[in-house]
Amino acid sequence: LLAWESMERDGYEADKNRLFIMDLKSGTKVDYTLGFDQNVANLNWDIDNRTIYFTSGIQATEQIYALNTTSKVITKITNGQHDYNSIYLEENNIIGTKTSMSSPSEIYSIDKNSGNEKRLTYFTDEVLSKIKMGKVEKRWIKTTDGKEMLTWVIYPP
C-alpha cells in the first residue's frame, strides 16, 4: 500500500489536502478523507500497517489524528491550544514537536491511544522562566453575515 497527500486542483492553495491510499497490486486508489472536512499532513504509517497517523488543523490548532484503514474511521488523538508541527512514530508512542502561543517548540511523547503527553525536552525553560506570558483566550464572535468566527485574544505579559 502507498499513502500520499493530494489536492484536487494543482496550484490552488485553498484546496483541501486529502489522504489517498493505493493498493499497488490492484492499482485501486481510495480517498480516505471524503467525509473529513480538514487537511492532512505529516503522514506516518504505524507498524501495524493498518493505521496512519497525521496532523490536521481544527479551529486554528494543529492536532494529531489516526486513520484506521480497515474501518476508514478517523480519530482525533490530541486536544488543546497548541500545534503539533511534525510527528514520528515509535512502537507505542508518537514523538512530536509542539508549539503554542505561549511556548516555542519542544519535543513530546504522545500515547497513541489516550493522547496523554509527556514533555521530553526543556530547551526554552531558562528563557521562559524570565518571562511572564500573557493569558490566551479562544473566542467565537458573530460576523456581519451571521456566521461564527474563531478569534484569539492574547493578553500582554
Image (tube, grey):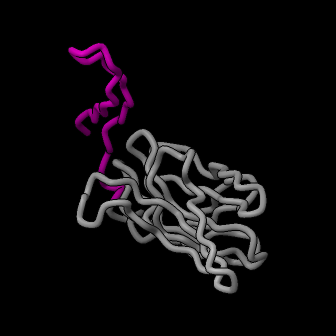
Query: Is 152 one of the magenta-colored residues?
Result: yes
Kindly identify the residue that appears in the image at 75 percent across and 70 percent down: 50
Image location of residue 29, percent across then percent down: 59, 70
Between 3 and 123, the one lying in front of the other is: 3
Kindly identify the residue that appears in the image at 62 percent across and 49 percent down: 76
Image location of residue 155, percent across then percent down: 26, 33
Residue 56 left/right relative to 90: left
| Start-end of magenta stretch | 128-157
Between 116 and 32, the one lying in front of the other is: 32
Residue 10 left/right relative to 54: left
Q: Quadrant of the C terminus?
A: top left
Residue 54 left/right relative to 26: left
Quadrant in which residue 6 is drawn: bottom left
Image location of residue 151, percent across then percent down: 30, 31
Between 76 and 22, the one lying in front of the other is: 22
Residue 38 left/right relative to 72: left
Query: Is 18 one of the magenta-colored residues?
Result: no
Vertical placement of 149 versus 129: above or below? above
Quadrant in which residue 135 is drawn: top left
Q: Residue furthest bottom?
A: 25
Image location of residue 35, percent across then percent down: 57, 45
Quadrant in which residue 51 is drawn: bottom right
Vertical placement of 125 versus 147: above or below? below
Q: Is residue 38 visible?
A: yes
